[in-house]
Amino acid sequence: MKKITIIGMGFLMEYIFPCVRGLNGEDTPRLVNAVTADAGDLEGKRERLKIPVLLNDSLTALRTLEPDWIFFAPPPTVALGLVETCLKPYCEQCRAAGRPLPVLFAFPPKPAGAYYQEQLGGDLAVVNIIPNMISTVGSEPVPAESCHLITYPKRDNFTPEMKRELEELLRPMGRPLVVEPDKILPVLSAEIGTHPLTELAEVAARALTDAGTPADYPAAASSMRFWHQKKRGFRSQYSNNVREDAVPDAGAREKMNAVLDCWYDALTHFLLDAGMDAEGAKRLLDPLFDLYLHEAQLETREEIVAKARKDATPGGMLELCLECYHEDIEPLLYRVLSAAGPVAGEDLERLNRLIRLAASDVVRRGKGLTGGTADAFTPEHHAVLFGALARRTLEAFGDAAPALLQRAVERYGRERGGRMAQRAAQWGVEPDMLAYLAFSEWRYPHHFVKSVESRQPVYTTLVHQCPWCRAWKEHGQQEYGPWYCRYVDEALVKGFNPQLELKVHSNLSEGADSCRFEWKGLAMTQDNARRLQELSQRLGDSCLKNCRSSPSGWATAA
């Protein structure tokens, strides 16, 4: 049994809390306490976990319990501040009292263990842990296929017994995979790069069906999983009801398998370029490819998407990976899988390049999670500025304020749309709805979670998480957000071309589950999707007001 203080009791720590309870049993309420920044769910966490949970008072939690282990899991953006204001004074107090330092389990991938030792002392025993987030598929536990990424610093103060305790703690939810400090971000990026394989099964089923070869989501996953196991000599020890002929058409299977092999080769070479050996890359990727295809085989897409939304840290690496997939990789996959004949070599080369670019961008996002140079102008700045202006307008102009705000936002939207139309004219592009999607002045995929509700007969998209809404909430400006969202997007479209119409059916800022955009008159057919992709590639970053707001290497359409 161990005394444990959990700093940052959010979704991740609640997810692994059964491991803590498994370690300490009925003594858990006495041996474990936690700290959260979520005032709204404070009582809920206390009730669910049955342990003391403090609000924003990490130092008191440490001094009260004097833990053997600290689970350190704040958002990466606040981790450095807590090291200075909480962990450092507590470690100094331990040394002054002659007590051993607690063992530090650091769950953000950055900073690395060496940083904690620099700040808290070279005698600190610290390990970075990136827990496995898929411990079951359907209702079946899959700990041997899922892995926790574990990184000890070069000055490794963990004894063999301490390492055994860590592995035993986490074993019920996945196997350990120890990664060297300088390789953790590339390995994590490659692991994240396997998540969209569930989406590959979806786009394969949709593309094949549209091309006249009916296939459903589980069948596409089963057939690709059969191929993966056969090609790589991998055998799952779990439910293995895979069938090559789940997709009966041999030509369709060949296309899916070519895409799957391209994906595997891209991530393998990405890892080799990062200094990992071929056997290590295979040991990581073989079970992960099987795991995510297994998930697509047994779970609905809605269940998988819901889990991804919970797992994705706002502004984090998984979120960027999924954004890159939906914006650039998915249209290419649909085109090659729905086309007649085998996949062209140049298309496989492009897919390989896009996957490796995505992995590289995800690494860069990981390196910047704890700080660095901020974007010159972000949605947070934009949202808070609007919130301040809206608040002052409502205070100053009384009953006239609502009409003033509406006119101001509509004028702003029409001006932006008009600038976009001027650029389209300069490029000789007809100002239709596809061009509107391509000629955006700025694109900021960070923090967005989006999906497509319908491609035909009318293209309809959903936004499930939005950085503007998040900023208004974090800065106490929720009441002002609707004044922006009600009018801006429809005005942008009208400014671009008065003959076009966008219908915004719902807004997150007004309490809806998603923003729902109906792009009137636009069907996202295969030809239109190809035209949008080609136009976006031609434009690159040329239309963006601030290219530093867009991930390096990605020129994407909304």
Image (cartoon, grey):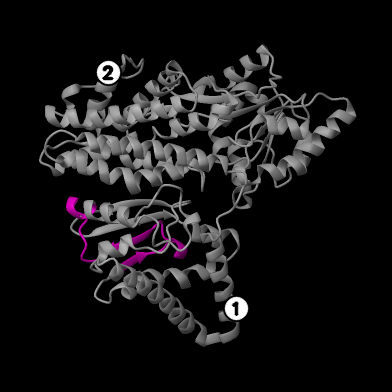
Distance in Å between CA atoms under marks 1 and 2? 64 Å
The amino acid marked with disc number 2 is: Lys
In the picture, the quarter occupied by the C terminus is: bottom left
In this rendering, position of residue 17 left or right of residue 6: left
Which residue bears the numbered disc 2?
A: 231
Residue 493 visible in the shown view: no
Q: Disc 1 or 2, which lies upstream in sequence?
A: 2
In this rendering, position of residue 254 left or right of residue 482: left
Q: Position of residue 305 (x, y in %)?
A: 37, 42
In this rendering, position of residue 143 left or right of residue 427: right
Numbered tag placed on residue 392 in the rendering: 1
In this rendering, position of residue 558 left or right of residue 108: left
Residue 545 visible in the shown view: yes
* Mark 2 closeness class: few <14, some 14–19, many ≥20 residues within 10 Å: few
Q: Nearer the viewer, residue 315 or 132?
A: 315
Query: Residue at point 28% right, 74% down?
Result: 497
The amino acid marked with disc number 1 is: Arg
Q: Quick check: 197 above or below 411? A: above
Q: Position of residue 119 (x, y in %)?
A: 76, 35
Q: Quick check: 398 above or below 426? A: below
Mark 1–mark 2 CB contact (< 8 Å): no
Residue 367 placement: quadrant: top right
* Mark 1 closeness class: few <14, some 14–19, many ≥20 residues within 10 Å: few
Q: Nearer the viewer, residue 60 or 387?
A: 387
Q: Position of residue 291 (x, y in %)?
A: 37, 26
Query: Residue at point 50% right, 61% down?
Result: 468
Q: Which region is colored magenta?
A: 503-529
